[in-house]
Image (cartoon, rainbow, N blue to C red):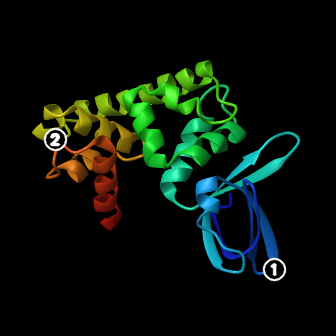
Amino acid sequence: MIYSVNGTVEVIEPNLAVIDCGGVGYACRTTANTISQLKIGEKAKLLTYLAIREDAAELFGFADTAELSCFKMLISVSGVGPKAALSILSGMTPQSFALCVASGDSKTLTNAPGIGKKTAERIVLELKDKVSKQDVAAGVKGSPIPVVAAASNTVAEAVSALMVLGYTNTEATNALSGLDPASPADELIKAGLKKLARF
């Protein structure tokens, strides 16, 4: 399994970046967000996911773990393939995607090319359910949940969004503790991610 590629950006095309690693060019399918951070001739590191089918093997590359995590979650949804996942993540940040799932906002997902209403609803339904299961499991283990999470809907949305990005209930709630519960959910998510990144 190829975990990451680290080298010089050789080619940039729509949804494709080629990274030269020691003379070997790795073609990575990717999102518009990741491509916007790359420049030809400069060094770059992409976290990767290798998709193997009967007729092909494709490498997908992402600038950070949040985007890779969202990609993996999206392709786990029935009927959502890598192309659709890239389409969604090209139109929004991982934080925005997590917030859509956490708040049940399937309509925003339909803004992505090739994503219809039924597919968007299925994404929210299946991924929100995963978050709920993680939430329940954390509760059974007796994980401490700060009072602030119950006091604000935006904090609850931010906790769910961070869990969509792969953090546990405890990690998410601890990262959001001490923040202003009146802040918009997207601001809480960004602040929470900054605190989590320090650890």
Q: Disc 2 residue type?
A: Pro
Image check: 45 left or right of 193? right
Residue appearing at x 56%, y 26% in the figure? 120
The image quadrant that residue 75 belongs to is top right
- What residue is disc 2 on? 144
Q: Is residue 144 above or below residue 3?
A: above
Choose mark 1 or mark 2, whichever is in front.
Answer: 1
* Residue 25 shown left or right of residue 98 in the figure: right
Which quarter of the figure has residue 132? top left
Residue 121 visible in the displayed image: yes
For this view, does 59 lie left or right of residue 75? right
| Horizontal relation, residue 44 to residue 171: left or right | right
Going 58% across and 44% down the picture, which residue do you hit?
91
SS assignment at label 1: loop
Residue pictured at 80% horizontal, 71% vertical? 25
Q: Position of residue 98 (x, y in %)?
A: 43, 40
Q: Which mark is residue 88?
A: none
Viewport quadrant of the C terminus: bottom left
Residue farthest to the front, as pictured: 111
Amino acid type of the residue tagged 1 in the rendering? Gly
For disc 2, the neighbor class at 10 Å (few under 14, some 14 to 19, many from 20) is few
Q: Is residue 180 above or below residue 18?
A: above
What residue is pinned by disc 1? 23
Q: CA distance from mark 1 to mark 2?
A: 50 Å
Q: Secondary structure at mark 2?
A: loop
Q: Which badge, 1 or 2, is on the more N-terminal residue? A: 1
35 vs 25: above or below: above
Q: Residue at x 68, y 61 (%)?
A: 2
